[in-house]
Amino acid sequence: MNAVAATLPVPARAKLGPFDLIEHVAEGSHGPVYRGIQRASRMPVAIQFLSDPDLDRFDPARISIASPTILEVLATGIFAKVPYVVTPLAFGRTLLGPFDDRQRSPVEAASIVASLAESVGLLHHHGIVHLRLSPRNIVLGDAAPILLDLGTSRHLRHGQAECTRLPVDATVAAPEQWLLGSRLTPATDVYQLGALLRLCWTGAAGGTESAISTRLLRHVPNSLRDVCARALATDVHRRFKDANQFAVALRHAIGRGQTHTLVNWWRKLFN
């Protein structure tokens, strides 16, 4: 348990506005997470206390993000001088989690990441960067992946945010996230999306655009490999500028990849 959880005076059934705080259930990357309930609707909620207050953190009072593929922030506030974020309690398998044992084709994995990129693109359109696109923050919904942890995303100022803490998940972190004080932009999220795609294909973390061709499995079509490599460029300026641009390129590559798969199938059938 981190320092915030150890010192936070949380009595049983504490009231945080319209929510009742019930019990501590997990340690999140930003602080302890509690199970709670919204008194009026009896809806179960997750309440995460944040160990590192940030003035640029997402504020639902400033911008309303309404999307079925992004978990809504219901409320924010301060309890015992510690800021907190309230969201619906998310259920389901997380991407690449212990219960996600499905074997996906390269095209199917790319389709999941493309859907996720479109959700992140909505954030970028509103001047927000997520910065924590790790597999644990992606729940596999019936129709599309659902993005969690909007409450710890950041508002951009003049197109950028300052790196104020080192990344929690090294498997998807962009190079600039390892340097405190560096500029974080939508291209930082693009790198993380590329890293997620690489993880789905290979299960391997690390590597850069120069290593992508040798790290990926041979059955990944070149069109998909090229898009992933550009997203993973070490130089921020060589990446796609935002998640929307990445999603368009990936959707186009998926179409070419499906054609590639069909041609290979026909070759095997008649050889």
Image (spheres, rainbow, N blue to C red):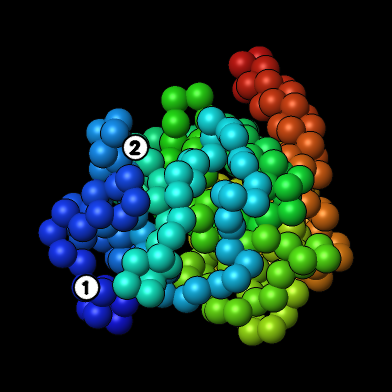
Residue 47 in the image: x percent, y percent?
34, 54
Neighbourhood count class around disc 1 (C-alpha, 10 Å): few under 14, some 14–19, many 20 upward: few
Which quarter of the figure has residue 64? top right
Q: Residue at x 26, y 74 (%)?
A: 8
Q: Is residue 271 above or below residue 135?
A: above
The answer to whether residue 227 is left or right of residue 117 is right
Q: Is residue 99 above or below residue 130?
A: above
Q: In the current view of this chain or complex, which residue is farthest to the right?
A: 237
Residue 133 in the image: x percent, y percent?
55, 55
Identify residue for label 1: 9
Q: Is residue 267 above or below residue 165?
A: above
Kind of residue indicated by mark 1: Pro
Kind of residue indicated by mark 2: Gly
Neighbourhood count class around disc 2 (C-alpha, 10 Å): few under 14, some 14–19, many 20 upward: few
Describe the element under mark 1 as helix, strand or loop.
loop
- Front-most of 120 and 214? 120
Identify residue for label 2: 92
The answer to whether residue 147 is left or right of residue 30 is right
Which quarter of the figure has residue 154? bottom right
Badge 1 vs badge 2, beta-carbon distance below 8 Å: no
Q: Residue at x 74, y 33 (%)?
A: 251
Describe the element under mark 2 as helix, strand or loop.
loop
The answer to whether residue 162 is left or right of residue 65 is right
Distance from the alpha carbon under mark 1 to that under mark 2: 30 Å
Whether residue 95 is visible to the viewer of this picture, yes or no, is: no
Q: Residue at x 80, y 40 (%)?
A: 249
Residue 209 in the image: x percent, y percent?
74, 63
Q: Residue at x 46, y 56 (%)?
A: 76
